[in-house]
Image (tube, rainbow, N blue to C red):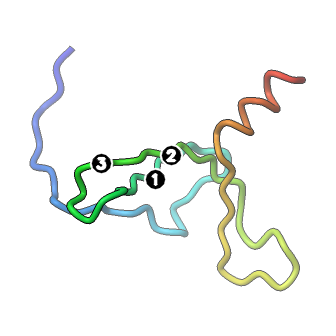
Amino acid sequence: MYFDGRELKPYAEPVLSNELQEGAVYFAVNYVDDEMLIPLMETLVFVGRNLEPGDVGTVYFQDVESIHTSYTSA
């Protein structure tokens, strides 16, 4: 399998809030150190927008571990 090469940007490009899709899986990458040498990756599922009364522009994610647990328990 071959993928064309592409130039990677030296910064993150977050997904815009209006582009998030319910039930879709997203990844968050953070770094433990200031030099950005030790990454942490978290897998998240987008749950929805404005789920609580009074929410305006709030987005909700659930960690993939709890989603996986609910699927395997059913």
Query: How far across and down, in percent of the image, does residue 69 sit?
Result: 77, 30
Q: Quadrant of the C terminus?
A: top right
69 left or right, relative to 8: right
30 left or right, relative to 11: right
- Mark 1 or 3: in front is 3
For numbered disc 1, what is the local secondary structure? Answer: strand
Judging by the rendered image, the residue that carries numbered circle 2 is 42
Dot 3 alpha-carbon crowd within 10 angstroms: few under 14, some 14 to 19, many 20 or more: few
Distance of label 1 from label 2 (alpha carbons): 5 Å
Query: How far across and down, in percent of the image, does residue 61 sit?
Result: 66, 56
Where residue 38 is drawn, which disc sits there? 3
Q: Are marks 3 and 2 in contact (CB under 8 Å)?
A: no
> Relative to the observer, which residue lies in front, 63 or 25?
63
Q: Tag 1: residue type?
A: Ala
Q: Tag 2: residue type?
A: Glu
Where residue 28 is drawn, which disc sits there? 1
Q: Are marks 1 and 2 in contact (CB under 8 Å)?
A: yes
Residue shown at the point (41%, 47%) measured from the top left: 40
Residue shown at the point (16%, 60%) measured from the top left: 10
In the rendered image, the vertical position of residue 4 relative to residue 12, given as above or below = above
Q: Tag 3: residue type?
A: Ile
In the rendered image, the vertical position of residue 25 relative to residue 48, given as above or below = above
In the rendered image, the vertical position of residue 23 relative to residue 59, given as above or below = above
Q: Do the residues labelled 1 and 3 touch (CB within 8 Å)?
A: no
For numbered disc 3, what is the local secondary structure? Answer: loop
Query: How far across and down, in percent of the image, does residue 45 sit?
Result: 63, 47
